Image (cartoon, rainbow, N blue to C red):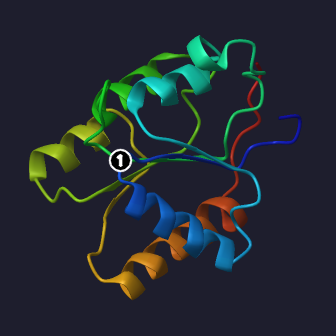
Amino acid sequence: MNTPLEILLVEDNPHDAELAILALKQRNLANRLVHVEDGRAALDFLFGVGTHKGRDVGLQPKVVLLDLKLPKVDGIEVLRQIRADERTKLVPVVILSSSRESRDVAMAYQLGANSYIVKPVDFENYCDAVTNMGMYWLVLNEIPLMKP
């Protein structure tokens, strides 16, 4: 991948991932999207190791959409590792989770999440939430230039 990545979607639920991708495609926001299904794959991708060994880690996403309840490595640990590394600490991370638990919300923000969105259960509301989030983080938000 030689073009800048815009979205890293970290979602293990195939239905939720499909809905998010569909909503983003409807607004032409999914042109440069990578979807991974677990926390280990997300970390491998971001840091260019494991299954993504050799990936240019200088090309980081404009935003990471991160579920919390993930196999292999949970979303909280993924967030912790993103914020602990100089190469990724400024990458915006939006938690997109079904959890409304106050401890999950608090922990995400304490670890440096930029936003926390509870997944709406209704199809229309889910698509609206993902689309609005995509418009903000990909079109309106300015991110600092990061050095590899």
Q: Residue at x 69, y 46 (%)?
A: 143
Location of residue 34 in the rendering, given as x and y in whole percent from the top left corner: 64, 45
Q: Is residue 115 above or below residue 26?
A: above
Residue 67 appears at what percent x and percent y? 35, 47
Q: Mark 1: which amino acid?
A: Asp
Q: In the rendered view of the protein, which quadrant contains the N terminus?
A: top right
Q: Residue at x 58, y 72 (%)?
A: 22
Quadrant for the C terminus, please: top right
Measuring from the top left, give residue 129's x and y in whole percent.
44, 75
At mark 1, the secondary structure is loop
User: Residue 139, located in which quarter of the rendered image?
Assistant: bottom right
Q: Above or below — where is 77 with respect to 62?
A: above
Q: Can the viewer see residue 86 in this picture?
A: no
Classify residue 43 as left or right of residue 145: left
The reply, left or right, for residue 14 in relation to residue 33 is: left
Q: Which residue, as the protein is rendered here, is positioned at the far bottom?
A: 124
Q: Quadrant of residue 89?
A: top right
Q: Residue at x 37, y 45 (%)?
A: 12
Identify the residue at horizontal 31%, vertical 24% (top origin). Answer: 72
Residue 24 in view: yes
Residue tagged 1? 67
Q: Position of residue 18 (x, y in %)?
A: 50, 64
**Left or right: where does residue 83 sit relative to residue 62?**
left
